[in-house]
Image (cartoon, rainbow, N blue to C red):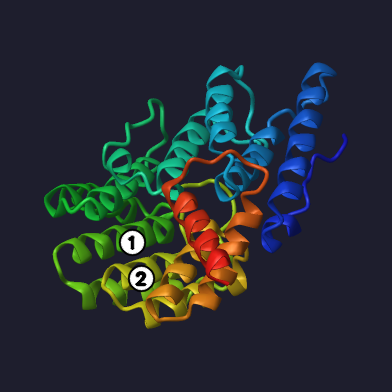
């Protein structure tokens, strides 16, 4: 059996084009395995997870959408992990969640549809995304409703002593943090996210619907008009997750708001560099382009 592994180092270093090329090759190798009946075609889902993540960091939203549609059309196949769960269902769930979160489409996040056929517990991701989207759209009541759903799932997981209790607990706390922020309970919100962030010693890779807690903490601080604190958190996140669009853009905005235009320009230039190969229409990217262009004209 041949290996369809991809070098995770590209994701760790934020080398998105190399990451994309590597994982496209891995997907092709897995599909060749299907044709030759070598039995490891399920590995393509692992590669596609990293491919989706790289697309969303580098301004390739069109390719990300095409990948989601491609997954919908794939034939049934066994999971690469040899378990009975349907890799297609979880991929559709997690890729759709990542898409709206990474692109800051908060209204779409608040109304993210549920994916048919999920395993018990997996809908936690959808409820979390909906809670974040509602909170960031200013709808505290809807955020509360989604947090309550996660708390219900958490209670069942604890009662059944299922092995993924810690994961559901983290998702629950993240959702509660954003609900608290929407309700103006910022001390509680920051405390919850900081507790999670301090435990995350490595970056969050893949398209599993998860965002780095420290980045969310920074986003929240920026929203609270505390740019100095936000900048520290963005920069801490970039040390373990270099090349993340949101952290680079956030660090640029925080630098602007603390009257450090040269630092803001440096971060924004990194954003332009990682998105140079894409055709993104993200409003954040247009803002970055305008800022850098204005600074260049002034100099």
Q: Residue at x 68, y 31 (%)?
A: 42
Nearest the viewer among 32 and 253 is 253
Q: Residues within 10 Å of mark 1 (few under 14, many from 20)?
A: many
Q: Which residue is mark 1?
A: 174
Task: Identify the image quadrant of residue 28.
Answer: top right
Proximity of marks 1 and 2: CB atoms separated by less than 8 Å: yes
**Secondary structure state at the residue bearing disc 2:** helix
**Residue 146 visible in the shown view:** yes
Q: How many marks?
A: 2
Residue 141, numbered label: none
Task: Identify the image quadrant of residue 107.
Answer: top left
Is 261 placed above or below 173 here?
below
Q: Residue at x 78, y 52 (%)?
A: 7
Q: Position of residue 99 (x, y in %)?
A: 46, 41
Q: Residue at x 35, y 40 (%)?
A: 123
Residue 193, numbered label: 2
Task: Report whether 180 appears left or right of 32.
Answer: left
Q: Residue at x 75, y 59 (%)?
A: 9
Q: Position of residue 13 (x, y in %)?
A: 70, 63
Is 159 placed above or below 79 here?
below
Give the CA distance from mark 1 to mark 2.
Answer: 6 Å
Is 101 placed above or below 172 here?
above
Task: Report whether 126 appears left or right of 198.
Answer: left
């Amino acid at each position: 059996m041949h290996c369809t592994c991809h070098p995770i180092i590209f994701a760790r270093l934020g080398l998105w084009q190399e990451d994309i090329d590597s994982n496209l090759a891995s997907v092709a190798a897995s599909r060749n395995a299907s044709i030759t009946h070598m039995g490891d075609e399920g590995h393509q889902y692992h590669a596609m997870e990293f491919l989706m993540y790289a697309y969303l960091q580098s301004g390739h939203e069109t390719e990300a959408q095409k990948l989601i549609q491609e997954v919908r059309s794939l034939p049934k196949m066994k999971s690469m992990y040899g378990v009975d769960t349907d890799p297609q269902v979880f991929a559709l769930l997690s890729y759709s969640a990542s898409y709206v979160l990474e692109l800051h489409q908060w209204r779409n996040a608040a109304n993210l549809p549920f994916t048919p056929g999920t395993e018990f517990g997996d809908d936690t991701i959808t409820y979390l995304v909906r809670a974040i989207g509602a909170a960031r759209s200013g709808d505290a009541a809807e955020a509360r409703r989604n947090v309550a759903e996660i708390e219900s799932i958490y209670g069942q997981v604890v009662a059944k002593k299922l092995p993924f209790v810690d994961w559901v607990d983290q998702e629950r706390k993240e959702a509660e943090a954003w609900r608290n922020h929407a309700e103006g309970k910022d001390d509680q919100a920051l405390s919850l996210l900081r507790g999670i962030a301090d435990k995350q010693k490595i970056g969050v890779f893949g398209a599993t619907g998860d965002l780095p807690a420290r980045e969310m903490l920074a986003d929240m601080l920026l929203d609270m008009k505390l740019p100095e604190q936000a900048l520290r958190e963005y920069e801490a996140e970039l040390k373990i997750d270099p090349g993340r669009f949101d952290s680079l853009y956030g660090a640029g905005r925080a630098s602007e708001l603390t009257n450090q235009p040269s630092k803001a320009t440096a971060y924004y230039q990194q954003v332009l560099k990682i998105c140079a190969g894409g055709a993104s229409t993200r409003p954040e990217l247009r803002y970055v382009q305008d800022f850098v262009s204005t600074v260049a004209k002034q100099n």
